[in-house]
Amino acid sequence: MDSKEKNFKDNGSVNADMIANSMKAQGRERHRENTRKINRLWLWLGVLVLIAILLYWLFSIGMFESLSGVANG
């Protein structure tokens, strides 16, 4: 094996390692992006639930009932 063949084999393995590392990095980035999207969805779901609880609480104490005229009394 001459030095050119040895260099080619060495560079080939380096390129394969670089491709593998690049693919791992791309996978990690996709995972982070998907995690961000899921976290954002959970955050908005929590906000909607809190708004629903607030509206239920306000109606239960009668503040909106008396203002909107829903209660007959």
Image: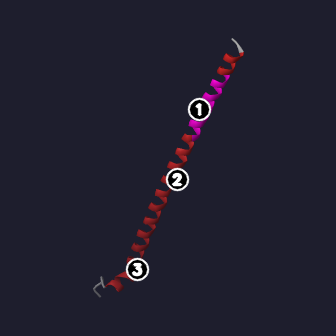
Element on which disc 3 rests: loop
In this view, 26 is above or below 13: below
How far apart are the two marked residues, 2 and 3, measured between alpha carbons?
38 Å
Q: Position of residue 23 (x, y in %)?
A: 56, 36
Residue in view at x 42 percent, y 74 percent: 57
N-terminal of the two: label 2 or label 3? 2
Residue in view at x 34 percent, y 82 percent: 65
Residue 47's disc number: none
Query: Quadrant of the image for the C terminus?
Result: bottom left
Left/right placement of residue 11 relative to residue 23 reads: right
Q: In this figure, which residue is indicated by the disc labeled 1?
A: 20
Q: Give yes or no for residue 21 being in the magenta stretch.
A: yes
Element on which disc 2 rests: helix
Q: Amino acid at mark 1?
A: Ala
Hey, which quadrant is residue 7 in on the image?
A: top right
Front-lying residue, 34 or 53: 34
Q: In this figure, which residue is indicated by the disc labeled 2?
A: 36
Q: Quick one: which residue is furthest to the right in this view? A: 3
Q: Are marks 2 and 3 in contact (CB under 8 Å)?
A: no
Query: Quadrant of the image for the N terminus?
Result: top right
Q: Position of residue 24 (x, y in %)?
A: 58, 37
Front-lying residue, 29 or 1: 1
Q: Position of residue 55 (x, y in %)?
A: 40, 74
Callout 3: 10 Å neighbours few (<14), some, many (20+)? few
Of badges 2 and 1, nearer the viewer stands: 1
Residue 61's disc number: 3
Q: Which residues are magenta?
A: 10-25
Q: Is residue 62 visible?
A: no
In this view, 62 is above or below 43: below
Q: Is residue 29 visible?
A: yes
Residue in view at x 40 percent, y 83 percent: 63
